[in-house]
């Protein structure tokens, strides 16, 4: 695990050092550079495999190729054996050298042979080209910046800001999408000029031209799915064992996060069967009746783990400025705070962590999976005339408090959530699956935003909207099973741009390498070919995974219903640290200076009185209002009312109520749920001296 960066077309020997220094937290163990005229590569190393060897940037034997690499190639021993059979020799025991020689032998086709998480760049000296690649599901991030005559890349966007010969500007579409989804989807970032290489893609830069190709697709399965359950169970057992074993390859201490739920408990259970020493496990709680510390501790005791617990409390919102610095991107989910703390605690004991991310996404574990599956059954069973003429009007008359009883969630459905359900019933058309999916996972809709933006920001949004990619609107091929189509949509942006990005950034902030066994591409391809009945059965998700885990987990854990990792932010709203952040970033002067939101609209949202037991209408809007002072340039913010030097980036942080669906609202203090945070950009030291 490392941090990588570089550029071509820039005659500045010091730039690569500045860029690399911003990534020191990703690789505190070593630093390396490579320069060749107007190009340079930089690398910060976190030593995990072959501690003595594997230094980067690494050159091949004839020095025609140079590699910088972030991640792990889990099947590198098998690839190495194959290459040796074809005459290749190796100087180190590292996966880095295997990757370099695999690229030398196979070119871009090497990507299909890799099992791992990675973002890497190869410089071809003879061609003067750069080859960038990212793993299939986007576990490791990779940003790039294309300017006239030059091209830069880095593991984190902050490194690209070290180049001063450009004027960053905000991306209005990214902000708009963030307000809906609570993260920035697709290849965009909040900085209009900076892009992310999409998961499962590679990019070639040569002579000022960029070509991007997709090398991996979410598997398509058109068959009837009539495999025997026992046969599927046996294959799942083999795949899980192989995936976990590969991710335990390490020359440094490793452990696992343990929430007490099915996914992380399954990972720990498989790990425990492969080692003789106690597994180091880490859990976080909130001094809250619904947290899962007791369940995690019971599972850890069952497997004889060396268990560690921490508590996340209201005063920990003071960590948000530091967290946002590491995120680079706005993420409106309160889970970033405990994840950051958990990584900090884990680093005191281990360097590598296995996590349970991905289990819900491939086996159908989320609430909205079941909601959409129910919707499909409803569409098939009830004629449209019956739905529109009788059922929808009846549901409209049902109180939200009664409808809330149908959902297992620590928060309330609320009037807002009820309306979202009713709106969803109008999207029950296979051709509109992408639209329905986005509707259910979205926080905002057009009704919320119509009054919020300034006229100048709306104009910028229309201007930048001309090249929008319709993200989240597409649907997978209709011939596939409904649930499989839904699960495949999550690979477009939910996983790479939300779940995996925050895991990478909060972990690497403390030099922790996170590994995700459920997202082994062989396991993904297996799971997405399973028939629906082996994922959701009798409205219980992850059916086959539960059967598998029942063979070694305590019965209570294997049978436990899905509970989201819920952060009780409603308990934090009146804490002085939270109130200070709110006053700093939602004050009238600050809102007016940024020019994105209408100050009177923000003030109106803040002043709305809470209803009994739930927040008022449009309070949900306040949760996404955020600050965005972009870059150190007097002209960088086109809507700013004054011409001040903006030396701070105020990255948007709507602290949402945890992992759950935006269908839900929490208690009467929801209007304060925008933990809009900031960080001091002078830490980056990118502001040019006067």
Image: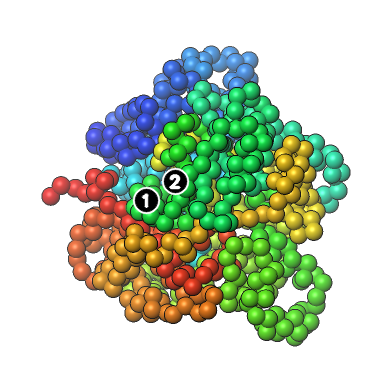
Which residue was labeled with disc 1? 319
User: What residue does disc 2 label?
Assistant: 340
Give the alpha-carbon distance from disc 1 to disc 2, as whole Å. 9 Å
Does residue 167 appear left or right of residue 121 in this picture?
left
Taking the spot 23% from the left edge, 55% from the top edge, the residue there is 647
115 relative position to 192: left or right: right
The picture quadrant where one finds residue 430 is bottom right
Percent position of residue 159, x then y: 33, 43
User: Residue, x 70% and y 32% (percent of image)?
Assistant: 241
Which class describes the residues within 10 Å of circle 2: few (<14), some (14-19), or many (20+)?
many
Give SS at disc 2.
helix
Sequence-earlier tag: 1 or 2: 1
Residue 403 in the image: above or below residue 129? below
Of 566 and 638, which appears nearest the observer?
566
Residue drawn at x 28%, y 73% is: 588
Is residue 209 visible in the rendered structure shown here?
no
Question: Is 264 in front, or is 610?
Answer: 610
Colour approach in the figure: rainbow
594 over 119 or under it: above or below:
below
| Residue 153 x/y as whole percent | 39, 41
Q: Can residue 533 be seen by looking at this rendering? A: yes
**CA neighbours of label 1 inside 10 A, class few (<14), some (14 to 19), many (20+):** some
Q: Which of 658 and 215 is in front in this view?
A: 658
Residue at 39%, 75% (x, y): give it: 606
Give the quadrant of residue 381. Answer: bottom right
Mark on residue 534? Answer: none
Q: Where is residue 441 in the image (x, y as percent from the top left)?
A: 58, 63
Element on which disc 1 rests: helix
Question: 30 above or below 635?
Answer: above
For the residues labelled 1 and 2, say whether their Cβ atoms are less than 8 Å apart. yes
């Amino acid at each position: 695990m490392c941090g990588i960066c570089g550029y071509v077309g820039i005659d500045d020997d010091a730039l690569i050092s500045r860029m690399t220094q911003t990534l020191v937290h990703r690789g505190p163990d070593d630093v390396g550079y490579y320069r060749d005229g107007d190009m340079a590569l930089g690398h910060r190393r976190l030593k995990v495999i072959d501690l003595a060897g594997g230094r980067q940037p690494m050159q091949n034997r004839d020095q025609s190729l140079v590699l910088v690499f972030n991640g792990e190639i889990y099947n590198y021993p098998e690839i190495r054996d194959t290459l040796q059979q074809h005459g290749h020799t190796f100087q180190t025991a590292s996966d880095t050298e295997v990757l370099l020689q695999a690229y030398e032998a196979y070119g871009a086709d090497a990507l299909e042979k890799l099992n791992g998480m990675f973002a890497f760049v190869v410089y071809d000296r003879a061609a003067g080209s750069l080859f960038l690649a990212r793993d299939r599901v986007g576990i490791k991030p990779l940003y790039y910046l294309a300017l006239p005559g030059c091209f830069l890349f880095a593991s984190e966007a902050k490194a690209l800001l070290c180049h001063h010969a450009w004027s960053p500007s905000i991306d209005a579409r990214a902000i708009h999408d963030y307000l809906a989804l609570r993260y920035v989807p697709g290849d965009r970032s909040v900085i209009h000029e900076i892009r992310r290489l999409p998961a499962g893609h590679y990019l070639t830069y040569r002579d000022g031209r960029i070509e991007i190709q997709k090398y991996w697709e979410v598997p398509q399965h058109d068959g009837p799915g009539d495999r025997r359950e026992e046969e599927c169970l046996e294959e799942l057992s083999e795949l899980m064992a192989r995936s976990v074993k590969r991710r335990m390859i390490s020359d440094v201490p490793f452990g696992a996060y343990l929430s007490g739920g099915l996914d992380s408990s399954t990972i720990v259970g498989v790990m425990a069967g492969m080692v003789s020493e106690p597994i180091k496990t880490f859990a976080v709680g909130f001094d809250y009746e619904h947290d899962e510390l007791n369940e995690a501790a019971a599972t850890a005791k069952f497997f004889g783990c060396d268990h560690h617990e921490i508590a996340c409390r209201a005063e920990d919102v003071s960590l948000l400025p530091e967290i946002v610095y590491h995120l680079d991107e706005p993420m409106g989910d309160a889970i970033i705070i405990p994840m950051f703390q958990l990584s900090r605690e884990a680093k005191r004991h281990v360097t590598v962590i296995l996590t349970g991310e991905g289990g819900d996404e491939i086996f159908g574990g989320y609430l909205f999976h079941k909601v959409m599956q129910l919707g499909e059954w409803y569409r098939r069973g009830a004629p449209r005339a019956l739905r529109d003429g009788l059922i929808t009007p009846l549901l409209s008359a049902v109180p939200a408090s009664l409808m809330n009883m149908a959902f297992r969630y620590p928060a309330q459905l609320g009037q807002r959530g009820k309306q979202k359900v009713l709106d969803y019933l109008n999207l029950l058309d296979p051709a509109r699956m992408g639209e329905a999916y986005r509707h259910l996972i979205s926080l905002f809709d057009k009704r919320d935003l119509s009054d919020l933006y300034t006229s100048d920001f709306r104009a910028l949004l229309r201007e930048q909207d001309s090249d929008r990619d319709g993200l989240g609107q597409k649907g997978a091929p209709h011939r596939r099973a409904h649930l499989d189509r839904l699960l495949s949509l999550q690979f477009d942006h939910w996983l790479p741009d939300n779940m995996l990005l925050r895991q990478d950034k909060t972990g690497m902030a403390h030099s922790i390498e996170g590994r995700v066994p459920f997202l082994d591409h062989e396991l993904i391809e297996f799971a997405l070919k399973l028939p629906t009945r082996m994922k959701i059965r009798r409205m219980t998700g992850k059916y086959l995974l539960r059967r598998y885990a029942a063979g070694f987990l305590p019965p209570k854990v294997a049978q436990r219903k899905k509970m989201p990792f819920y952060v009780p932010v409603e308990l934090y709203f009146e804490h002085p640290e939270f109130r200070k952040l709110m006053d700093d970033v939602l004050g009238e002067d600050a809102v007016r200076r940024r020019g994105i939101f209408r100050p009177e609209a923000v003030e109106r949202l803040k002043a709305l009185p809470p209803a009994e037991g739930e927040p008022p209408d449009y309070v949900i809007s306040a949760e996404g209002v955020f600050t965005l002072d972009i870059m150190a340039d007097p002209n960088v913010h086109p809507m700013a009312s004054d011409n001040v030097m903006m030396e701070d980036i105020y990255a948007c942080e709507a602290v949402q109520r945890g992992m759950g669906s935006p269908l839900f609202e929490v208690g009467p203090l929801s209007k304060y749920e925008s933990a809009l945070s900031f960080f001091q950009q002078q830490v980056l030291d990118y502001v040019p001296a006067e």
